[in-house]
Structure formats: C-alpha cells, structure tokens
Amino acid sequence: MPTTTLETIWTRPALMIFSETEPVAVNINAGQWDIGSAGSNFLYLTDDNRSELQIDLERIETKKRMINGRMRAYHVADKRNFNVSWQDLPSLNSVISERAQGGSSTGWASCQEMLTWYKDHTGSFYLTLVYDTPSAPAGAPLKYSLEYFNVFFDDFNYVIKKRGNQTDLWDISMSLVEV
C-alpha cells in the first residue's frame, strides 16, 4: 500500500494529492496516511509556480416565502468548489522539483501527468489537502491538518506557453467540484 509520511514542515499549505481511493489514517500521531490501496493511482501536485488555492462554498438550499410573510429555508448541504492554477510549469516531470518519500525520490506531477489524470478520470476521485499546523508543544507528536474531498473535474484548461529545448512551459488551471 502506498503510505505517505507527512513529516516535512512546509512553509505554506503546499501538499495537494489526487487519489483514486479514500485516504485512511494509518498512524495519525506519526502523520502516516494510506492514500491508495494496492494498484490504485495517486498524484502529487507540484507547488512550483502555483497560484493560491481558492475554495468557494456553495450552499444548497431552498428558500420560500410563506403566506404569512415569513421566510422558510431548507438547507440540504454545503459543497466546496476548488480553483487552482500554475504558470510556467514544465511539461515533463524530469525538471519538476523532487520530494523525498520513504527514502526514495518521487517527483511531483508534470503538466503531462495532470492532463492524463484529467483524461482518465471522468468520474469522481479524492483531493487531499495538507496544511501546516501551529508548532506543537515540546515532546508532543506533530499533528497534521489533513482534509480530503470526493471531487469531479468541473473545468481543466492548459496553454502551451513557451517551447523549450528540454521541455515546454505550460499554464494550467483547473476547477474541482465536491461530490
């Protein structure tokens, strides 16, 4: 099982992961999460040249004015919309920053890999977001604020901006909608 240890202290909320299966806490005190069962795919999205991650809340409800003039509202759910983009991102992962995972070096997803994920996943998948937390007291295990959402692609756009000798530079933007 591809287990990831989220032990690195990031300088900002930097980790976004796409996975086909729901993340499961293996050892929450050590920050270990199983992000996919054997044979499932997952994708680390790079933080290189990433814009801010915009999260919009959509309230699903019905409002109706009654005969006496009072308003009635029936709240169904709150759903999130995620918007993120990258500028001048290399199309090949050989030139994307690398991160250490379990002693081996694993690269971040390139433009080509993001495009392939978009084409291959017409249904729902999981978006995992890892945020930094305030400093833990001395001796306490580091806790992580990890959220995951079952999402669909709402929109995916890319522009091949510059052609290069080793790789092209793309601008990518995507919108995801919570199921």
Image (spheres, helix red, strand yellow):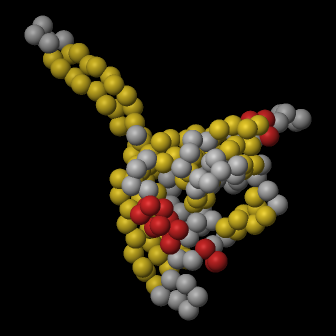
- 179 lies above or below 162: above
**104 displayed left or right of 149:** right
Outermost residue on the right side: it is 139
**60 displayed left or right of 72:** right
Identify which residue is drawn at 40% across, 36% down.
Answer: 79
Outermost residue on the left side: it is 67
Residue nearest the viewer, comparing 119 with 13: 119
Q: Position of residue 58 (x, y in %)?
A: 35, 37
Q: Can the viewer see residue 26?
A: yes
Q: Quadrant of the C terminus?
A: top left
Q: Position of residue 77 (x, y in %)?
A: 37, 28
Outermost residue on the bottom side: it is 165
- 60 lies above or below 38: above
Q: Position of residue 57 (x, y in %)?
A: 40, 38
- 147 lies above or below 154: above
Identify which residue is drawn at 75% across, 42% down.
Answer: 31
Q: Can the viewer see residue 88?
A: no
Residue nearest the viewer, comparing 30 with 84: 30
Q: Position of residue 5 (x, y in %)?
A: 75, 49
Identify which residue is drawn at 40% across, 70% down.
Answer: 158
Residue nearest the viewer, comparing 164 with 20: 20
